[in-house]
Amino acid sequence: MITKIDSEKCIGCGICARTCPLDTIRVNENGKAFIAYPEDCMTCYLCEMNCPNGAIYVHPFKELLPRSLPNCY
Ligand code: SF4
Ligand code: SF4
């Protein structure tokens, strides 16, 4: 599940909001991404992988996932 968007790192590009297949993330009027519907997150990691500034954190962290999972990102 998406756990955090670091507003200090966020540059407001909106990539995460456009990438998320479930409309979980929005960008506010101040140009900062925020988690609008956390319960909708399916932990696909697309937002974290596509954020150009490393501002998004999805749990469980990829480093902790079993190596047997396909590396599709
Ligand atoms: S992709 Fe990253 S930098 Fe761009 S709006 Fe989302 S959190 Fe901010
Ligand atoms: S992990 Fe996937 S479903 Fe969850 S917020 Fe990011 S892109 Fe959306």
Image: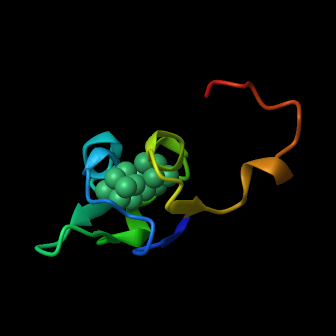
Relative placement, left or right, of 52 versus 25 is right
Q: Nearer the viewer, residue 5 or 9?
A: 9
Q: Nearer the viewer, residue 39 or 59?
A: 59
Residue 1 visible to the viewer: no
User: Residue 29's spot in the image, x, y percent?
Assistant: 10, 73
Relative placement, left or right, of 44 versus 26 is right
| Residue beneath the point at 27% across and 52% down | 17
Number of marks drawn: 0
* Placement of 16 over or under 73, stated as above or below: below
User: Residue 26's spot in the image, x, y percent?
Assistant: 23, 63
Which quarter of the figure has residue 8? bottom left
Residue ranking furthest to the right: 67
| Residue beneath the point at 30% across and 44% down | 15
Relative placement, left or right, of 10 versus 32 is right
* Placement of 53 over or under 29, stated as above or below: above
| Residue beneath the point at 79% across and 32% down | 69
Residue 52 visible to the viewer: yes
Rendered image coloring scheme: rainbow
Residue ranking furthest to the left: 29
* Placement of 37 over or under 11, stated as above or below: below
* Placement of 66 over or under 8, stated as above or below: above
User: Residue 28's spot in the image, x, y percent?
Assistant: 17, 72
Q: Quadrant of the N terminus?
A: bottom right
Q: Quadrant of the C terminus?
A: top right
Which quarter of the figure has residue 25? bottom left
User: Residue 21's spot in the image, x, y percent?
Assistant: 33, 42
Q: Nearer the viewer, residue 55 or 57?
A: 55
